[in-house]
Image (tube, rainbow, N blue to C red):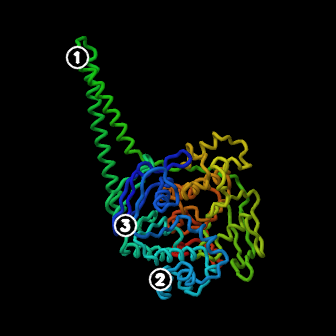
Amino acid sequence: MLQIKNLSYEVGGKTILKDISLFLGRGEKVGVVGVNGAGKSTLLKAIVGKVEKDSGEISMKGSYSYLSQEIHKEIGFKYENSSLTIAEYLILDQGLDVEQWEISKFLNNLNMNDKDCESVLGELSGGQKIKVELIRILLRRPDILILDEPTNFLDIPSSEWLMRYLINYPNAVLVVSHDLRLMNRGLSKIWFLNELNNNVEVYKGNYDKFLKLKAMQDASLVRAITNITKSAKRLEKSAQQLSGRQTYKEAKRASRRFEKVAELKVEIRKKEAMLAKSKRMKITLPTPQRCSREVLLIEGVSKKYGENVILEDINLEVERGQKVVIIGKNGVGKTTLLKILAGKLEQTKGKYLWGKGALVGYYAQEYENLDYSKTVLENVCSLSTLDGWTNEYWRKFLGRFLISGEMVYQKVGTLSGGEKTRLALAKLFSQNLNVLLLDEPTTYLDPSSQEILLQTLREYEGTVIMVSHEPKFVEGLGVDMVLLMPEERFVYYDIKYLQRVGLM
């Protein structure tokens, strides 16, 4: 169904993909894995022609449907002020040969029981619009489904349904996902993008089997390195003994053995390179400046757009050092509240007051604080509060977030979702803040980076107010208080609220 020969791709002088050759057979279900920035999304974009490859050939048989990782941004323009109903969009606008009952079935499966075929697109929440796009892609029933992080903006019931759907899908599936449950249950092959050599390693089986095979390979490499090292040491000792003698034959033998030792050392270095692990973020937050005990007071804050009430009469008090999570489905105003507190939006009524000495930073889900037209360095060097930081200092700091080398001269718009997230976090964490407003900070991060961010925030002595759809992340954070929406109830954290975290 899909054949890739010698595919290579570079951006800003950085090699992303190098001489990649792959094959996707009829009905195969392949998971694409690798750390953030390894080139997973780039590979999918190259396959569907969204980026122009530098060299190589890509041939595809049959039809395909592609779900972009940044679908949430694309639909913003597509659906803006749209008066089309869901059925009109899918059947008339997109030309799908389906019945309305089929659309209704997909709406129910994707946990949109409160919507039907007559619901207007322009009135849907962002998460619901993404679900409609997923329905469009799935109802095309293509020969190849190409999905880039399809569960990023889905609630847990919808994600679980999608897993089952992909397992039983009769045609080929190519999917990038950090949702390891999806990989374990549904996939028969893994394409592992190795960022150390910019190539792809193919493993038969699901993600669990991939991890076991990778561990076995690493153990085999360790044994081989140990054995070769022992041989090299024995040869080197023998060569040194021979080299001290005067006969021509013994000198010749010593020379050959020294040459062999050099060859073995080259082989050891090659195997050690194969054993090298992916770099991990190294985030350390300094002890934040002290502020007043009462960090935030909210009294009767409400927000309306015309007649549409988003927030109504929110009242709460946050104390210094508390970790607060805002929990509620999409469309109840979680992001709106964070934007108000960050000064990006103005409330319709009510007031909020930050405590004395509060230094507030905001991580926006849509990377609002990043300028896509500027380079990475230009984005961070613009921080007025850090005038003393030189380019060299910034490069060193960014390196802790795995942003290094020529990447600092790339335009932000060319970065992957995970790389943008790490840049936004670096920009935020460089400012020595004592209050962090975080809107879905884990969405594009690989599991390793999520774990490091979780540990950093858990140890952080400042105040955290966060929106997250990741139950495990919330569970491990050490949450003190929860704002339940749309009830607008501010209560002590209880583990029972975790079941609501993944509902969008």
Which label's residue is closer to the chain start, 1 or 2? 2
The residue identified by callout 2 is: 97
Apparent side of residue 275 relative to residue 410 in the rendered image (left or right):
left
Percent position (x, y) of residue 279? 48, 48
**Dot 2 lies on which element?**
loop
- Above/below status of 495 relative to 406: below
Please rate how many residues cluster around mark 2, counting C-alpha atoms within 10 Å: few if below 14, some from 14 to 19, many from 20. few
Q: Name the residue rendered at 72%, 56% in the picture.
A: 359
Q: Name the residue rendered at 57%, 44% in the picture.
A: 406
Q: Quadrant of the C terminus?
A: bottom right
Q: Name the residue rendered at 44%, 48% in the picture.
A: 18
Q: Is residue 322 visible?
A: no
The three-letter code of the residue at mark 2 reads Asp
The three-letter code of the residue at mark 1 reads Glu
Percent position (x, y) of residue 199? 41, 50
Q: How far apart, in angstroms, are the residues tagged by discs 1 and 3? A: 60 Å
- Above/below status of 364 relative to 277: below
The residue identified by callout 3 is: 29
The residue identified by callout 1 is: 250
